Image: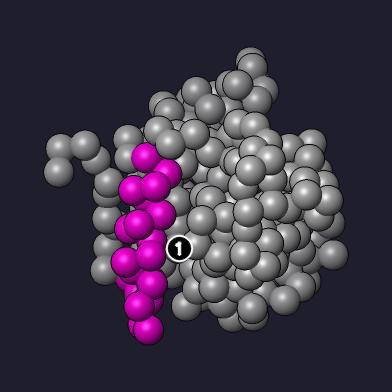
Amino acid sequence: MIVGLEKTNIGTRLQNGPPRRLAALHHASVTMPQAIDLFTPDDSAHATVRHINPSASLHPSRIEAINFAVAHDDGQSDHDLNNADLILIGVSGSGKTSMSLYLAMHHGLKAANYPLVPEDFERLALPPVLRAQKHKLLGLSLPPARLSEIRKERRPHSGYAALDNCQYEVREAEAMMRRAGIRWLATTTKSIEEISTTILQEMQPQRLRYQGEFVLNVSD
């Protein structure tokens, strides 16, 4: 159980996650961790599993990081969050799972991720479990229209994927991060590699202190 959250909130958080994909990833990371090839080179932060590469090899620290990312995906567990290098937050569909796994696979970072949901917006506060870890938080966001497209692939013709709902959730999530002093990335057009590089550059001793939103775009 997630400390400080009602059971209804846990259900809200978990129902939007990708349990079958995560179950497959967890099985692969445990039974053949040297053989996972998750992302195509040109994928965005919303990348998905591509295939298993039997020639790949992973350092034990990266295997540990992958297992950590899977165990702490989508707010499933708050156990051992003190050992996280980074905690990604954002609305469902903003690319948190893919980015967490990419950072684990390619950089050995223990990256947890946690969704921001309407219950949080109604409280006008971060989920209680995240408050003690505020210095490790980094937000992910994206335009509502793009979020709606992503969600329609998961749940076509649903209120979850409706554009007005996506506009509401993105607006409220960004307002919450701004109030809490949490920096966030706009994951729109850059590749997952470029976004991860930006994250790594930000992870200095006093990392992720709020200085406003920084947006990645192709006009650089």
Q: Is mark 1 on a helix, strand or loop?
A: strand
Apparent side of residue 204 relative to residue 82 in the rendered image (left or right): left
Q: What stretch is highlighted in magenta?
A: 191-210
Q: Is residue 127 shown to the viewer in this render?
A: no
Queried whether the magenta region covers residue 195, the answer comes back as yes
- Residue 2: which quarter of the image? bottom right
Whether residue 52 appears in magenta in the rendering, the answer is: no
Report if residue 56 is visible in the image.
Answer: yes
For disc 1, the marked residue is 138
- Place residue 212 in its image quadrant: bottom left
Q: In which quarter of the image is the N terminus?
A: bottom right
Left or right, 124 with respect to 79, comes to: left
Residue extending furthest toward the front = 55
Image position of 155 with respect to 123: above or below:
above
Image point 15% across, 43% down: which residue?
A: 220
Which residue is drawn at the image coordinates 50% and 73% (left, top)? Answer: 136
Q: In which quarter of the image is residue 203?
A: bottom left
